[in-house]
Each structure stands twice: as C-alpha cells, then as structure tokens.
Image: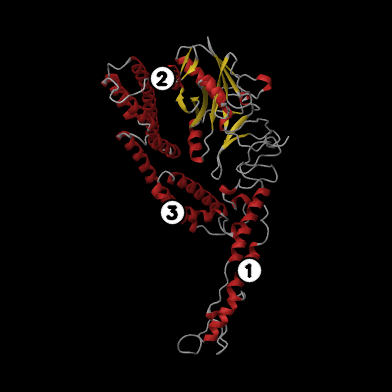
Amino acid sequence: MRRDRRQIQTAVVGSADSEEPLVLPLEAIELDAFRSLHENDSFWCGLLLGGCGGQLTTKLYTDRVCHFAHHPGPDGQPHVCGRRARSVNSADHLYVKSAAAAWLHNRGTQADVGFAQPDGTPLGSVVDIQLAHKRLRVHLDQSVAPEWDSPHEPVLGISVPVDQDTLIKRWYVHRIRLDSEGTSRRVRIGTEAFARPTEWFFLEECDVTERGLSTPAVERIIQAHSTPEPARWTPGQKQKTSPQDERAQELMRRLLYARRTESPDLTATVCREITELSGAGPQLQGRLDAAHHSASLWVEKELESRRTLISLLDQAVGTRKLRQIQSLIKQAKKATKVDQTRQEKEAIHAAVDYLAAEIPATVNRLDALLEEVSFIPANGAPELLSRKVHQISREIDELGRVGKGVPHQRAQLALWEERLKSLLVLPPASTAPGPLHQLVGRGYWTTKVCPLCGADHGQQCVILDGPRTGQLRETPHADRLRLLIGEIKERQTEDIRRAPTVWQVYDVTCPVCQKEPGAWCQTPGRPHALRYKLAADFTQQRKPNSKEKNRQRDIEQAAPGAPEL
C-alpha cells in the first residue's frame, strides 16, 4: 500500500474508540498553547473517524500547517493508515452527535443519536437523531440523497443541493454547518426558503416542535404563508399602529443590529428595554420574548467566555508562560474587539508589556553568549563552541516567539535573527574533527528526508537496529547530515561564484609609465587615462584579478565532500 501523505487535522482523545474529537491548530504559535493545554492527554486515529486506531503525535512546522502524525512502526518505517477523511471537517459527525446530545439534554428531551451507514455509506456521512415523536437525519455530504417523503426530516450539509421545486413545496428546508472555534467545531442550523437567503442560528436558538426542527426563521416563513394578503392602502386612510407596537419594532431592529455587530453591551441594554416594554400586540410580544431569550443566552455565554480568557491570560503572565501568553493575547484581542472593558484592556496591555520587557532580557543573554563565543579558541574547544552555538539557537527561537506578540519590535527582531542565524550555518573549519551533528544547526536537522530511515521533512530519525529499534534518535543519521552539509557548501560556493569581479585603476600596470599594480603614476594629479581604460576593459572581459584568485581558492577549499565521522 502506498503511503498516504495527506495531513491529519483531527483526532480523538483518550483511546481509539473515543467519541471526544478535537482539531489541531494550523499555526505553530497556537500549537504551543495546545500542547500545554493537552500535555496529559493522548491522541488517537479514532475508529469512529475511519482510522486505524493507532496513537498520534503532534507535528509543529513554521513553513506549513501543523498536523497530527502516526508514530513510526516497530521496524522504524513510516506507519501506513487507510483512513480516508483527514481534513478539519473529518470529525464533524462526532461534533454533531455531541452538540445534539447536549442541546437535547439541556431541554430535558430524550433522544438516541447514531451514525447510520445505509448501503455501505462511509462512516460520518449521515447522523440519525431519534426523538420520541420525530426523527432527524443529518446529511453532512452528498453520499446519501435526502428522502423528502420518508418518516425522518432531512437536515442538509452546505454541500448538499436542493432544487427549487422542493423549496416551494416544503416552504423551507434546514441546513447545518460547523464553524471552527479553537480546537473545536460549533454547530449552526440554517433555514433556507425559496427567494430568501439562508438564515443561520445557534442550536440554543432552535426548538423541536410537532412539525420537527424549528428556528426563528421558520416562524416567520409559516406566518408569511398563513397570513392573508393585507388590505390595499388608499390615500387618505392612515394605518393605525399603537405606540407600543412601534416601540417593539424599533427594539427588534436595534437588537438585530447589536447581534450583527457582536456587541454584548448593546445587546444587554436592548434586552433590558424589552423587559420594560408592555402593551405590545400578542403576536409581536411573542417575537420579542423569543428574541430576548436568545439574546440573553448569547450575552451570558459571550461574557463568560471573555472572563475566562482574561483570567487565563492573567494566569499565564503570573506563571511566565511565554508561548501561552502570546497565543492568549491574540485570542483576547479578537474576542474583545467590540465593547472592550477597562479590565480587559488593562490585562491585554499588561501581557503585551510583559512580552516587550522579555525582549531586552533575551537580547542581553544573546549579547553575553556572543561575547563568550568570541573568546573561545577556534581550534581548541570545538565541543564548547558547538554547545554555545546551540544555546544561541534556542535563544533565537525564544526571541522570535516573544517578538511576534509585540508588533513594534518586529523590525528589530528581524535584524537580530539575520545576524545570529549566520552562526548556525557551519562552525569554523577548524572544528571539523567533531561529530557531524555539531557542524549543522539543530534547526536544520530535519529539513531533508533521511535516505537511511526515511524520516520525512520535520520528523526525527529513528533507530533501525538493537533493543531500541523504532525509537527516536537524539541526533540525525550521518547520511542525512552529509546531505545537509553538502547543500550548505553548494550555496556557499554559488555565492562565491556570483560575486562580481571589478578591476580598480591601481589593480593594473600603467601602460604609459609602466608603474606596477598598487604604485601611483608619475603624473602629479590623477593616473594616466589609458590606465583607467585598461582597468575598465579588464572588468568588462571578466579577467581574474588577485581578489578573484582568492575566491577561486576559497571554492577549491569548499568543494570537497562532507567530513567523515
């Protein structure tokens, strides 16, 4: 079986048969916080995901998205898994089951939720929800066509088509979508009707009635079909509307605006005004009560989420967890972009200031390390020099992580990284007798596929023989390191070859007064004009001068293969 190289973005927690899914963050900065949060959890290629049941590990990358990966097999070879669905939405059926069960439980409704596989359909395409008086079938993809005349009510994924005749006949159909929120997915229910845009709602805003699944949009659609055509307006006849009804309609418009702008403060204010209103018509009052209930739940959940986020940020600053601080700052800024309170603003500023204060401390440590390196003999202490270079590498990584949370420091950090990473390419030639892994910076060890054990880009080499076969090696195989050193030398050689050759006027012998290179002409002012012309001709003809000969010598010294162990 050929190895499937598609990246795994979802897993289950705890065991292979677990129903608790999670999504791996795509960015390296978010994966650091994810690892800290789940340091005591194990991840599995779940059986309910169509996986092999093997244990997974997380892979962090800065040049591509992060993902889960299987552990190598006992023989050290990459694990082969036949799992078909691996993307972010591959665990949506588990999220649907969990969300539906929690929603119905909170409503005091008993229901059975299962994964149907009619006619051999792939696991996860269909989710069946059996209620006491109604059955819902969720179609997450197009593998199973919806049956409109069957006992169960279809709920369609966003990729499942529906024709206009069905919309006209049924008045509306329900849709489902899942939005990523951190390492989870949140369910939204949409109502689509003919000549109407799809309206989306959270599960908490939906209901289950004798007709089946219902949303606030369903009530409006049924009312529009059931209400007789209003009498035509004629000039001179003024429509009578009570002040309470006008006030109720105004509050509905303001509440809709508050929800669309995701403003908890404005939403809470409108909710208070709704509770103070009395005397509206029965129908309008019912709509107001439903909107008030939904908005109040949203405000409570939003404020609780923000309080939790700020509390975690304060804890991370107190415990000096730099990676967690950086991730939480980003989340807090996004969550509090509207109606930011003074406490939230102070907490975010304190975290940013803490990161900014860590930059000079890290830079000072790097300065001290560079000074120590400058006093190490080039040929007298290769092990000490290598250890210092690796220590500098770790400090550079820490500086980069800290600096990403402080925007005004990014230009300075870029200069530091360029200056310091030059130490990680290759130590001085005099340190060559040391082990090969000391000749290549640790950050470059996994940038090539190992020709011996087959470790992929970003993966450590594994032990191929002995009692520890299959375990990760502390250092890469020598064959992998030789590839890296050869590539580095090729780049150095190419840089030398591309260097321009320019002849200066005193690099040539004067054709008039015969003065040797480096000697001034006998003229009292400038050199002879023919000497200028000769230097320009040699530059145009790319004749090698003394500097060019030195470069050729450097090429010859850099050309030999990688040093032996």
Q: What crowding class fits label 3: few (fewer than 14 Cα within 10 Å), some (14-19), or many (20 or more)?
A: few
In the rendered image, the vertical position of residue 240 relative to residue 336, given as above or below? above
Nearer mark to the viewer, of 1 and 3:
1
> Separation of disc 1 and disc 3 at Cα?
33 Å
> Which residue is nearer to you in this view: 393 or 88?
88
Residue 189 visible in rendering = no
Question: Do labels 1 and 3 touch, CB within 8 Å?
Answer: no
Q: Which residue is mark 2?
A: 229
Residue 554 sits in which quadrant?
bottom right
Q: Is residue 296 visible?
A: yes
At label 2, which amino acid type do we have? Glu
**Tag 3: residue type?**
Asp
Structural distance between the alpha carbons of marks 3 and 2:
81 Å
Q: Position of residue 57 (x, y in %)?
A: 59, 33
Q: Residues within 10 Å of mark 2 (few under 14, many from 20)?
A: few
* Disc sitting over residue 367 in the figure: 3
- Answer with mark 1 or mark 2, whichever residue precedes in sequence: 2
